Amino acid sequence: MLLLDSLYINNGGGKVLLDYLVERLEQSNREVFYLFDERCKKEFQQIPKTRKLFLKASLWNRYWFYRKHRGLFSKIFCFGNIPPLTKQKCQVITYFHQLLYLKNPFNIYIKENTSLKRFFSLLFRQLFLKSLSGNSNKWFVQLPSLKIELSDKYEININNVDLMPFYPSIPKDGNSYERIQNAYLYVSGGSPHKNHQLLINAFCRFYDKKKEGKLTLTIPDNFSDLCDLIKEKQDKGYPINNIGFVKRENLYKSYQTHEYLIYPSLAESFGLGIVEAIEHGCKVIGADLKYMHDVCIPSLIFNPYKEDELIKVFERSLDKDVKTTHLNIKNRINEVLKLLS
């Protein structure tokens, strides 16, 4: 029996991938037991109670789960960065997708002016992961750069780190839409590393010069500072539309009606929105960072730390000869399922 341990996954891109993985595992008729975060308790109703358990995400609960079910599983897939807390007799595969575990805590403390509490928390997590790294026989990652960084930082044999990106496509909704020229879309929450402030300021300065374009954002209401900034710009006449949080299945129209996806994020372990946009015909204006070049060959690139560079790229995007974006990765879900069998 396969164990899918997703105890730390309950939202965001990780949850999108988890839902897809569970769906495909259930379709495959494999014998699987699922360990879920209790915050997902209202979901996964299609799975019989005998094959799932919801727990509060904690080290203690996870430790006791493995202790109680020792020897029951023939293979374990940890879908949340952290291998089991004890060595297992069966094969263990760990899916790694958390960039914080790769960052230098000292750099974060100094450059980002973070608190000592956050510094020690991150340092402890990284030391903890290093102490457990030997409990996983194999690691899956989503991007080539992550493969190298994970291997280097935690001294994991690079032959034990496999590139296994997988993702669900957004289905068509049956309608046809007109793609609007010089329309820019950024599908993202409002976390600081998503770099919205630089994007908004650059777009407004670009609009002052060219009187062209419109910008669509998907920032939830709980990011009040960003929402206030957008309202301030809207009141001044700038064509910025914040449509708030949009369910993934409802994003098809947004991708179909915009010429460009613009992606200024400073850090991504994958960038699912980039893949989705390319699959639905958007050109990508991307940050000149490793994750972007791993995922695609963007139509235009810019330094995401320099507002003036982004303004120049906005201006360049008005030209009619901007090249199409090409996707560099493919969905390897079938290979993942085969390795989990």
Image (cartoon, rainbow, N blue to C red):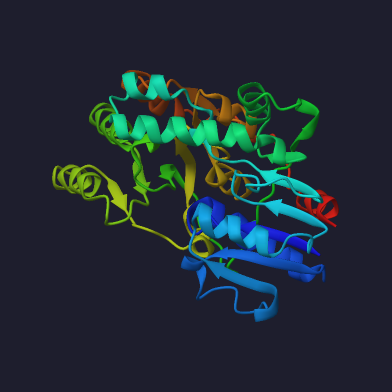
Nearer to us in this view, 280 or 225? 225
Name the residue at 53% across, 64% down: 249
Name the residue at 26% across, 31% down: 201
Name the residue at 32% across, 55% down: 220
Nearer to us in this view, 127 or 20? 127
Residue 284 left/right relative to 338: left
User: Looking at the image, can residue 37 be seen?
Assistant: yes
Residue 313 left/right relative to 338: left
Instruction: Quadrant for the C terminus, please.
Output: bottom right
Q: Position of residue 339 (x, y in %)?
A: 83, 50
Instruction: Quadrant for the N terminus, please.
Output: bottom right
Q: Quadrant of residue 318?
A: top left
Q: Position of residue 139 (x, y in %)?
A: 72, 39
Q: Disc count in the image?
A: 0
Name the residue at 60% across, 27% down: 293
User: Looking at the image, can residue 325 be seen?
Assistant: no
Q: Quadrant of residue 296?
A: top right
Q: Position of residue 184 (x, y in %)?
A: 41, 42
Does 195 appear above or below 113? Answer: below
Nearer to us in this view, 290 or 66? 66
Nearer to us in this view, 59 or 281? 59
Q: Position of residue 25 (x, y in %)?
A: 75, 65
Does 124 appear above or below 3? Answer: above
Does 103 appear above or below 20? Answer: above
